[in-house]
Image (cartoon, coloured by chain):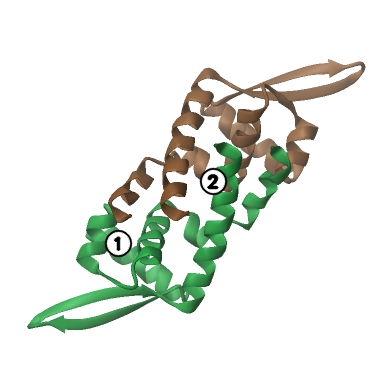
Chain colours: A brown, B green
Amino acid sequence: MPEKIDDLYSFDRMIHEPARLAIMAVLWACESADFKYLSMATGLSKGNLSAQLKKLEKEGYLQITKTFKGSYPNTSAALTKDGRKAFDAYRRSYLKLAKELS
Amino acid sequence: MPEKIDDLYSFDRMIHEPARLAIMAVLWACESADFKYLSMATGLSKGNLSAQLKKLEKEGYLQITKTFKGSYPNTSAALTKDGRKAFDAYRRSYLKLAKELS
């Protein structure tokens, strides 16, 4: 199997970090998710989630939208076109290694 | 799918780093591998490979053996029992996420 292991270096470090990988994987599955749902689905603390969302937004991988649900502020996030493309590339490398490991 | 994403936090960071993940994956497949083979199979530069091997050895995940092949010094590495156990746990988490992503 080892002839394909060097594909690992194409792993996008911005996505590979487990907290961000969790966020990206949730958003890959959902069209868009609000802050509360993301926190529940990823198990991240609010502070960590907030920090990681900002990093991913800065990278251009997701868009954060602040609206109101009635009188409550509501933050939601969705992958951008670039984010979806980047995650798809990461996902392919990830699944390639999964084949080697299974 | 997102109900399982928080398993990601059990990812062993020592293994998750791509260079070390490549080394561990090669050694998982082989009983033992020499430096030259590891360098070829992982695509890592000699300096980087050497540094990562030392980190993994310090963690107790692999054992480095220096011998001679004829009059040439030969360095080889093999997973320890702890390393094999740690990689197996990582591998299971990895494959669990792969199922969600495929």
Whole-percent x, y for residue B52 in the image: 36, 63
**Label 2 lies in what chain?**
A
Whole-percent x, y for residue A63 in the image: 62, 21
Whole-percent x, y for residue A79 in the image: 59, 24
Residue at position x 59%, y 46% from top? B97
Residue on which disc 2 sits: A17
Nearer the observer, B70 or A44: B70
Q: How crowded is mark 1: few (under 14 residues within 10 Å), some or many (20 or more)?
A: many
Q: Can residue B56 be seen in this view?
A: yes
Whole-percent x, y for residue B68 in the image: 15, 83
Label number found at residue B49: 1
Q: In which quarter of the image is residue B74?
A: bottom left
Nearer the observer, B77 or A92: A92
Residue at position x 30%, y 59% from top? B48
Extreme residue toward the left, this view:
B71
Q: Can residue A60 be seen in this view?
A: no
Secondary structure of residue under mark 2: loop
**Label 1 lies in what chain?**
B
Secondary structure of residue under mark 1: helix
Q: Which amino acid does label 1 sit on?
A: Leu
